[in-house]
Amino acid sequence: MLSNAPGLGAQPGPRVTVSGRVLDKTDGQPLTDAHVYIANATLGAATDAAGYFRIEHVPLGNYHFLASRIGYQKQEKLLLIDEPVDREINFRLELQIIEIEAVVVTAVRPRKWKKHLKRFEEAFLGTSRNAKACEILNPEVLDFEKVEGGVFVAVASQPLILENHALGYRIEYDLKDFREEAGVVEFKGVARFEPLPGESEQEHWQANRRRAYQGSLRHFLSALAADHAEVDGFLFYGVFDLGEETRPIEREDILGDIASPFEKALRIRRYVQVIYSEELEEDAYAALETRSGPLDPGDQISWIELRQPSARFYLNGNLRDPYAVKVHGYWAWERVADMLPLDYEYTLSN
């Protein structure tokens, strides 16, 4: 492990406080006990009797803030925090009209549905060590279908409730889109993380979170920004196309400065191959790649591809637009069960 590496031991970056108010859209009255939270993070707060909320220790980033309350429609707002200045954001929620539909009671799920559920779990949660300790608590909200061209599609009538006993999180995942075609999986959604209770498990969870962070795309970008990628165990090369021969490149070839002192820009012509040498790939991935012959796990190898001319990211490694980057290889194999909240910060103490 690289416990003494300067990148992994870096102090957390700037933090700000986001506050505001949640009101009824119709009459402007304050809504108490509404919950405001940041998508894909553990950060959130409930409103007081006057509808005010306050969320502290928010790292710089581009966030989706959501406000919800029983009986009201959920509202989502985008807030860019690109400098260490406290922010204010307000919500006005509309009453939710609930239509009662006919209820169909099925004693036993069809065998085909169970088969599809297994396929979905492997594609969505992954097949890593962490995935084995991750469970969907309400799979009954899922439905599946195969559409034209062999595309496998999953839809959820309600947010999925997950418990990740490897990383110590309960996750509410609002699945917006899921499709699998020819082995390529794409899904979008909004997650809300809550730490699981259990004092006796904290040390175990922290160790697993540290392992999930090390070698990740976020770790690589953070180390790249701080100019100690190689110290942290990363090597990177230019590649014209996947599977082709690599060529040496320098940090300056793919990294650019921008006006903000808290951000960098990733610029890639075709692909960048990233090798993380401080931890071997998991056996499940090695078996997938080897397919036959003796199992011989090697270094974790991934590829980065940009979906636009450049991708801005913060010094902590969080991307301003997560969809600006497409990954292949080991990073693409890791799924929701290996996902950490955006506000997770690696320090030597954790």
Image (tube, helix red, strand yellow):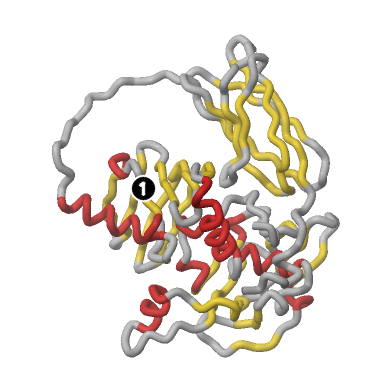
Q: Position of residue 40 (x, y in %)?
A: 56, 46
- State the residue in front, 338 or 106: 338
Residue sitting at 62 percent across and 51 percent down?
342
Q: Is residue 190 visible?
A: no
Establish if 213 lies above or below 112.
below
Q: Quadrant of residue 311?
A: bottom right
Q: Is residue 298 visible?
A: yes
Establish if 119 lies above or below 85.
below
Residue sitting at 65 percent across and 65 percent down?
219
Q: Position of residue 100 (x, y in %)?
A: 30, 20
Amino acid found under the numbered disc labelled 1: Ile
Total numbered badges shown on the rendered structure: 1
Q: Is residue 70 left or right of residue 147?
A: right
Q: Quadrant of the N terminus?
A: bottom right
Q: Position of residue 172 (x, y in %)?
A: 46, 41
Q: Quadrant of the C terminus?
A: bottom right
Residue sitting at 72 percent across and 37 percent down?
56
Crowding at mark 1 (Cα within 10 Å: few <14, some 14-19, many 20+)? some
Q: Position of residue 344 (x, y in %)?
A: 63, 52
Q: Quadrant of residue 318?
A: bottom right
Residue sitting at 72 percent across and 69 percent down?
223
Q: Quadrant of residue 203?
A: bottom right
Q: Circle 1 sits in a helix, a strand or a loop, which is it?
A: strand
Q: Which residue is mark 1?
A: 136
Establish if 137 lies above or below 186.
above
